[in-house]
Image (spheres, helix red, strand yellow):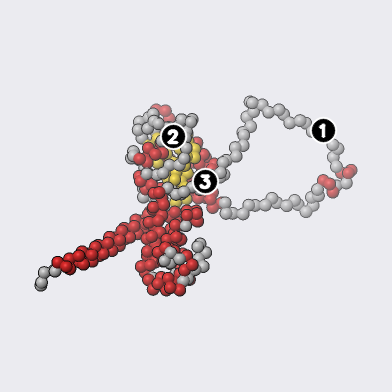
């Protein structure tokens, strides 16, 4: 075989560069697809009511022993009361406050963060400084905390950037022991619970804290489902009843002076009705760079799959338009996967998936997409 001519070497190098770039792009696309598939699969791990009931039955059967300060018996009594509080919550916001109230006998410090659009915003806390939050704004989750939000880990117990980021909103004092647990609804993390040992060396009953969080997640799902049920109307009066104005004057009882209501007293024992605050996430804001990058990466993977498996229909749409009419099922399935991961609000306001479809499959011409309902 004759040796390569010197004038052919630039051509060979160019060809090799093209092939290497193509291989690298395919490897990156495959890696992103594997990561996205893994995250979606992990989101399916969600405790059901049967598991919560088994946990509740198993914990009291552990034959606790009496120790100093009430010990295990005192902790079990506090846990039982906390369960009653959580299960009796009339609304989602009241549920979160009752969760913190129930945790007070079990942990030194606790705080809840609402998770929305990839950010964690402080909702309420117990045991921390009265002036919290120490700084305004939401927390951008570091990688170790992001893995808990995405369902790649059940909790965060190892100190690092995640604990420091949440604690920076609440206190300048770092405890020796802590745990961060997710509250999930429909396989998505809607809130994060942070508890730590405060001035103590460790959290005495982390397993009870986790069981209570699982119970709160189950109750949260029940309250959310109840919002879809129609409200019951007041029952109508019986047919024989007549309004007072329809009765003859002789049938009306004689008027009598009504006693004045008693003056309010500071020693009154009547409970004050507390109107729970609704769970409201922070106002819509621009996505943080990390969340946007992850969303754009998943959109490229999903749209790239459509382009890979249906090249003929994509080429036809690029020539004649109506991509949605040709690939309706595939586009709807891909969009549903994106919305499940990042939420309908993100796509509705930032249109990351839609813009990726237009740029990759429609050559940047939105008119070639056709009558898509989300376009």
Q: Return the residue nearer the eye: 286 or 227.
A: 286
Find the distance from the CA under tag 3 to the CA under tag 2. 21 Å
Secondary element at tag 1: loop
Q: Quadrant of residue 269?
A: top right
Secondary element at tag 2: loop
In this figure, which residue is indicated by the disc labeled 2?
170
In this figure, which residue is indicated by the disc labeled 3?
283
Compare marks 3 and 1 and give the one earlier in the sequence. Answer: 1
Q: Quadrant of residue 305?
A: bottom left
The percent position of residue 138, horizontal first and vertical second, equals 45, 42
Total count of labels? 3
Compare marks 3 and 2 and give the one earlier in the sequence. Answer: 2
Task: Name above or below for residue 61 compared with residue 345.
Answer: above
Whether residue 214 appears in this view of the structure is no
The percent position of residue 277, horizontal first and vertical second, equals 56, 41
In this figure, which residue is indicated by the disc labeled 1?
257
- The label nearer to you, 3 versus 1, is 3
Marks 3 and 2 in Cβ contact (< 8 Å): no
Residue for point 41% across, 66% down? 363
Residue for point 39% across, 66% down? 306
Q: Which residue extends farthest right?
A: 250
Residue for point 37% across, 60% down? 301
Find the distance from the CA under tag 2 to the CA under tag 1. 56 Å
Q: How busy is the neighbourhood of tag 3: few (under 14 within 10 Å), some, or many (20 plus)?
A: few
């Amino acid at each position: 075989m004759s040796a390569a001519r010197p004038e052919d070497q630039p051509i060979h190098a160019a060809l090799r560069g093209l092939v290497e770039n193509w291989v690298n792009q395919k490897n990156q696309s495959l890696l992103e697809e594997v990561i996205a598939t893994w995250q979606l699969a992990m989101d399916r791990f969600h405790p059901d009511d049967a598991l919560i009931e088994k946990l509740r039955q198993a914990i009291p059967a552990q034959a606790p022993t009496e120790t100093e300060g009430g010990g295990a018996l005192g902790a079990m009594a506090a846990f039982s009361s906390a369960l009653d509080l959580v299960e009796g919550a009339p609304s989602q916001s009241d549920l979160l406050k009752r969760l913190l109230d129930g945790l007070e006998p079990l942990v030194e410090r606790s705080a809840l963060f609402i998770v929305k659009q990839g950010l964690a915003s402080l909702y309420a806390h117990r045991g921390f400084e009265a002036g919290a939050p120490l700084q305004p704004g939401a927390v951008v989750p570091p990688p170790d905390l992001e893995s808990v939000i995405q369902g790649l880990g059940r909790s965060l117990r190892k100190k690092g950037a995640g604990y420091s980021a949440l604690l920076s909103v609440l206190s300048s004092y770092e405890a020796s022991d802590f745990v961060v647990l997710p509250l999930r609804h429909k396989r998505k993390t809607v809130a994060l619970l942070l508890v730590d040992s405060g001035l103590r060396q460790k959290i005495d009953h982390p397993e009870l804290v986790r069981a209570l969080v699982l119970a709160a997640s189950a109750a949260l799902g029940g309250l959310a489902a109840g919002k879809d049920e129609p409200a019951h109307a007041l029952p109508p009066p019986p047919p024989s009843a007549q309004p007072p104005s329809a009765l003859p004057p002789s049938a009306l009882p004689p008027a009598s002076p009504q006693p004045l209501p008693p003056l309010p007293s500071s020693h009154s024992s009547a409970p004050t009705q507390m109107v729970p605050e609704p769970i409201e996430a922070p106002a819509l804001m621009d996505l943080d760079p990390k969340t946007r990058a992850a969303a754009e990466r998943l959109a490229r993977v999903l749209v790239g799959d459509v382009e890979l498996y249906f090249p003929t229909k994509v080429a036809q749409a690029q020539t004649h338009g109506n991509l949605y009419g040709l690939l309706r099922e595939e586009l709807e399935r891909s969009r549903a996967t994106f919305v499940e991961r990042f939420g309908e609000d993100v796509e509705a306001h930032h249109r990351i998936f839609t813009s990726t479809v237009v740029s990759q499959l429609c050559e940047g011409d939105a008119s070639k997409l056709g009558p898509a309902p989300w376009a």
